[in-house]
Image (cartoon, helix red, strand yellow):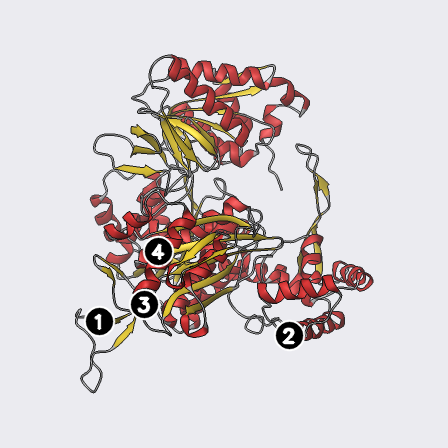
Amino acid sequence: MAITHFTPQLISRGNGRSAVLSAAYRHCAKMSHEAEARTVDYSNKKNLAHEEFLLPPDAPKWARDMIADLSVAGAAEAFWNAVEAFEKRSDAQLAKEFIIALPVELSRDQNIALVRQFAFEQVLARGQVADWVFHDDPGNPHIHLMTTLRPLTEDGFGSKKVAVLGPDGQPVRLKTGKIQYKLWSGEKPEFLEQRQRWLDLQNHHLALAGLEIRVDGRSYAERGIDIEPTTHIGVAAKTLQRKADTKASAIDLERLALHEAQRQKNAARIKDRPELVLDILTSEKSVFDQRDIAKVLHRYIDDPESFQRLLARIVESPDCLKLADETIDFATGARVPARLTTRAMIRLEAEMVSRADWLSGKSGFAVRAKVLDTVFGRHERLSDEQRTAIEHVGGAERIATVVGRAGAGKTTMMKAAREAWELAGYKVVGGALAGKAAEGLEKEAGIPSRTLASWELGWQQGRRRLDDKTVFVLDEAGMVSSRQMATFVEAVTRSGAKLILVGDAEQLQPIEAGAAFRAIVERTGYAELETIYRQKEPWMRAASLNLARGRVKEALSSYRANGKLIAKTLKADAIETLIADWNRDYDPEKSTLILAHLRRDVRQLNTMARDKLVERGLIEDGHVFRTEDGERKFAAGDQIVFLKNEGSLGVKNGMIGKVVEAAPGRIVAAIGDGEGVPQVTVDQRFYRNLDHGYATTIHKSQGATVDRVKVLASLSLDRHLTYVAMTRHREDMALYYGSRSFHLAGGLEKLRSSTRT
């Protein structure tokens, strides 16, 4: 299960440590420690999964020159040797290190994406170096992140302490008249902020992966769970323990003894009351299965007989309720275990819906017609349904919901609604599960926003309280879990504020994560932004709306009637036809995209599409660029896709670009459509997460809008993915499939209308 281990430590000469030697061990590399004129070799260590050495965007030239043309480990070796050469004191603090546990539920690539985002937002953005390695130990994936204690200056390294500045920008002085200083690398408030942001990002990436599980930074005691936290053993102690077990010898480590004593105490409590396991589970997720119960139980119970007996007691407990029986996924043949929850969780959701129902019957937040007319006069391009939605959320009720389909103008509507509320004398604030969404709400709609976790933390500390003059906008409501939604509904109820829920449960639907939003929508009613502005043809907009409503059969009928469903006997024939049609329709002045669900299909489609352009002489064979997935060739005119967020480049996962210049190991790419679009220079030494972008996965396309789309359907698609794939286009879309496989599976319409559990 995902855990919250996030531990800082200082690497200091005073306790006999070296930054270079620490880096060598973490990178599993051979490094020279210049200060001591010796070499250490940890290259035989086998747990290194990934490594990166990143300088902040404004790093001085000397730092960039020092690591140029070096491997990741070589860059770390050069940099930390420079740090050690600068620090003269015998007890000098050399670096700060964070040891951070990664969620085992995420894949290696997903964990790398999670760490990258954290490093860019919380380390590089502070002007610090991010030297991090991913150790993929079985059952214990984690990272070591080393950061600097001094700022990088044009001449070398700056001071570890900086003056505290007041609101006027001037140094704060103590009563004695002396200037107050603080550590440049951050003190306890900054650490707590970083830790909370890590938890936020972890939860966001778990949601993106379709997992309902959430991490909680609070202790078991704070959550009301009668379980003692066990002592973290650490890799060194575990190594000693393994060696002792191998040699059948005993070791005497206080840490191990304390850990085992706590485990035994918790085991005794679980034997007395097995339902404690359910308390732990529901603090992380509202719906689970028997395997989840077994994982938690295994933390404390070693005896096989006791384990099986307790597992049976928990599953058969009156507190444990079965939501769905065990089934078989006919598309894959995999067994889908029975889904379980607890009576307490059912009660929590019922109370949430009851509160929402109560809020819908309370008034006091009406926006006068005169104010609405003023706002509508400022925004003459608002559609009738956008105006209706604004009138709905501007009503007197203390709760209102808006269901806005992808491309239907939710942000435009919320910007105008915010102006109306402010003219009426209300304060408008917002929140979202992900930091990116909160940032978008603030930037595009002008609503000051934070992550939901940040709001909760502020309330616990007595800050950022809501009142009866506050309108709280919760964006991406379809991704919020039942427990978290209940918290915000309760907070709004008690404070006298108004709650606005905005979401689209169709486009990105993690397992069980949209239940709370749907429950409230069904109980309180909603305004719907139906018109899909992305598509130019009226029949395409109508089909997109049918897809959004789950009417897949009607949508497919429209596309079939217009010749946009192309069936071939075999999938291989469908691919050949898709590429031939794409090649015939290819126009460099139009943005195009091929979508598929499976990565192996994307790879094949990319290769075939590019080969066609090279054959026609539209692009050259290109220069070799070493990506994370192997060597690729890029040339001017190539369409590419960025696969990871990179703050220093200003690119995000799934972003499409076009190559402007290409050289061995280096490209310049334009991002966006039209004239004057930004360009980025990508060097394979620093960023390798890109690929040809003629084809991409449907997941990567969420949020994208292009002129023309061609979709390869596979049996692994479901209704939600179909919705995403068939609503990315402005001008044209065609879907290609192998009729034989779909016929055996029950037909295209039947299969596409299903939703995977």
Q: Are marks 3 and 1 in contact (CB under 8 Å)?
A: no
Quadrant of the image for the N terminus?
Answer: bottom right
Q: Amino acid at mark 1?
A: Leu
Task: Residue 253: give its label.
Answer: 2
Rendered view: 185 above or below 125: below
Q: Amino acid at mark 4?
A: Phe
Which circle's residue, 2 or 3, is located before the other in the chain?
A: 3
Task: Residue 87: give its label.
Answer: 3
Q: Position of residue 384 (x, y in %)?
A: 32, 38
Q: Position of residue 529 (x, y in %)?
A: 39, 40
Q: Amino acid at mark 2?
A: Leu
- The outermost residue toward the bottom is 176
Q: CA distance from mark 3 to mark 1?
A: 27 Å
The residue sitting at 60% across, 37% down in the picture is 755
Mark 3 crowdedness (10 Å alpha carbons): few <14, some 14-19, many ≥20: some
Between circles 2 and 3, the one closer to the viewer is 3
Which circle's residue, 2 or 4, is located before the other in the chain?
A: 4
Left or right, 138 with respect to 50, comes to: right
In this orientation, which residue lies closer to the viewer: 607 or 196? Answer: 607
Element class at badge 1: loop
Mark 2 crowdedness (10 Å alpha carbons): few <14, some 14-19, many ≥20: few
In this orientation, which residue lies closer to the viewer: 177 or 351? Answer: 177
Task: Residue 79: give its label.
Answer: 4
Q: Amino acid at mark 3?
A: Glu
Left or right, 341 with respect to 519, comes to: right
